[in-house]
């Protein structure tokens, strides 16, 4: 079962299967050639999945709908707005870049809520992905085709960061407001840099480290500049999503929409089940270069995410929720309950 199987309507699937069986696949009068904006992230699980989209959509539609990937058309933080406005018909976007606009997009960044991919997938199936699918459509004029996640997040740093005290004063690149709030609370200095600026910032000492995907950090060889690679279980899972401009989607035939969705469900399933093997491969490649992934002991993770610090992340979530007119505390409580967890002290 895919991440969104429960959240996404699939009423058109039977019709397209019957049509295919009868040789009655209907092509539109004019072929669609769609550009898909993606983040430049070589050697990452994200890119591996995005590179499959053109082939899958072409296969699903008998070549009537084609997709071309472009990683330089728009910047990463502008991809979503470009799809919303119809400047780019598709993208491989990140929820977390929108967490400042709507905190539900960054639910998985809250300390202690989600600790692994299994919990992320379970919460997604339970209610979260259905909720954000509606948000994508209402606020960003986009239709969700598939959900997935980057490899587990790690902290690449120039000096070892092995204790709560080691964070103090460190300038660390973060990519979401929830983690930024936590870093500020423990005495670090969060820096929201674009990925393209990370290598020179590390080299010049502008930042001391970066939170990013294990696979991406390895692919970019961040370990050459920041040889300490640490798993702190801070926002460990960061999701991505394949979206299409709603007007573009509505302009496709029902047969093509159904066929494309079947392929995207398959992509989603592959992204889920390839997750840990991709993480392991990245870790092994770093080990071959003499770089070891250090995992923080539970006792130290508890210190870093104690209520007096984690409370800042939750407060940021709740305050923004209040501005948007929904009950942030009730939303977070529901997430903890779905995962069978007691709400954290400070949440």
Image (cartoon, grey):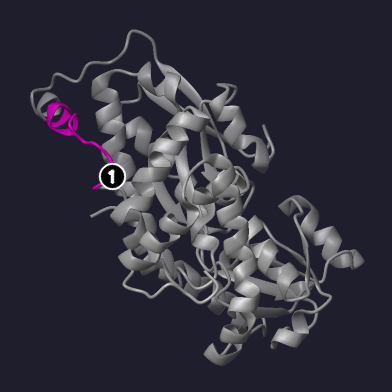
Q: Is residue 320 left or right of residue 6?
A: right
User: Which element type, helix, strand or loop, lies under badge 1?
Assistant: loop
Relative vertical location of residue 144 with respect to residue 127 in this rendering, above or below: above
Determine the residue positioned at 33% across, 67% down: 337
Q: Is residue 117 left or right of residue 70?
A: left
Residue beneath disc 1: 7
Q: Is residue 9 magenta?
A: yes
- In the foreground, 135 or 78: 135
Relative vertical location of residue 256 with respect to residue 283 in this rendering, above or below: above
Q: Residue furthest right?
A: 204
Q: Where on the picture, by quarter, is residue 44? A: bottom right
Determine the residue positioned at 56% across, 55% down: 318
Q: Position of residue 22 (x, y in %)?
A: 8, 23
Q: Is residue 200 magenta?
A: no
Relative vertical location of residue 68 with respect to residue 277 in this rendering, above or below: above
Q: Position of residue 135 (x, y in %)?
A: 45, 37
Q: Quadrant of the N terminus?
A: bottom left
Q: Position of residue 133 (x, y in %)?
A: 39, 40
- In the foreground, 255 or 1: 1
Magenta residues?
A: 6-17
Q: Position of residue 246 (x, y in %)?
A: 43, 24
State whether residue 222 appears in this view.
no
């Amino acid at each position: 079962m895919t991440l969104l199987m429960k959240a996404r309507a699939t009423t058109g699937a039977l019709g397209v299967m019957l049509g295919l069986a009868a040789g009655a696949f209907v092509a539109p009068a004019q072929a669609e050639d769609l550009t898909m904006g993606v983040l430049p992230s070589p050697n990452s699980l994200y890119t591996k999945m995005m590179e499959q989209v053109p082939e899958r959509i072409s296969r699903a539609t008998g070549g009537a709908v084609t997709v071309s990937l472009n990683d330089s058309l728009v910047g990463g933080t502008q991809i979503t707005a470009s799809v919303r406005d119809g400047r780019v018909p598709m993208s491989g976007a990140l929820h977390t870049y929108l967490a400042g606009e709507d905190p539900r997009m960054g639910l998985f960044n809250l300390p202690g809520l989600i600790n692994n991919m299994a919990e992320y997938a379970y919460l997604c199936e339970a209610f979260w992905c259905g909720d954000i699918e509606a948000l994508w459509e209402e606020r960003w004029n986009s239709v969700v085709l598939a959900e997935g996640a980057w490899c587990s997040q790690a902290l690449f740093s120039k000096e070892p960061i092995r204790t709560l005290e080691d964070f103090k004063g460190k300038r660390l690149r973060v990519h979401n407001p929830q983690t930024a709030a936590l870093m500020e609370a423990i005495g670090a200095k969060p820096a929201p840099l674009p990925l393209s600026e990370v290598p020179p910032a590390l080299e010049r000492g502008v930042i001391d480290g970066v939170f990013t995907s294990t696979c991406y950090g390895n692919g970019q060889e961040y370990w050459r500049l920041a040889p300490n690679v640490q798993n702190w279980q801070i926002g460990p899972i960061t999701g991505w999503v394949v979206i299409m401009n709603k007007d573009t989607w509505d302009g496709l035939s029902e047969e093509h929409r159904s066929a494309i969705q079947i392929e995207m469900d398959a992509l989603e399933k592959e992204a889920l089940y390839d997750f840990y093997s991709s993480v392991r491969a990245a870790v092994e490649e770093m080990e071959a270069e003499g770089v070891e992934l250090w995992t923080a002991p539970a006792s130290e993770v508890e210190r870093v995410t104690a209520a007096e610090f984690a409370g800042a992340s939750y407060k940021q979530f709740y305050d923004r929720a209040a501005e948007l007119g929904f009950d942030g505390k009730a939303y977070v409580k529901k997430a903890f309950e779905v995962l069978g967890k007691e709400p954290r002290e400070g949440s």
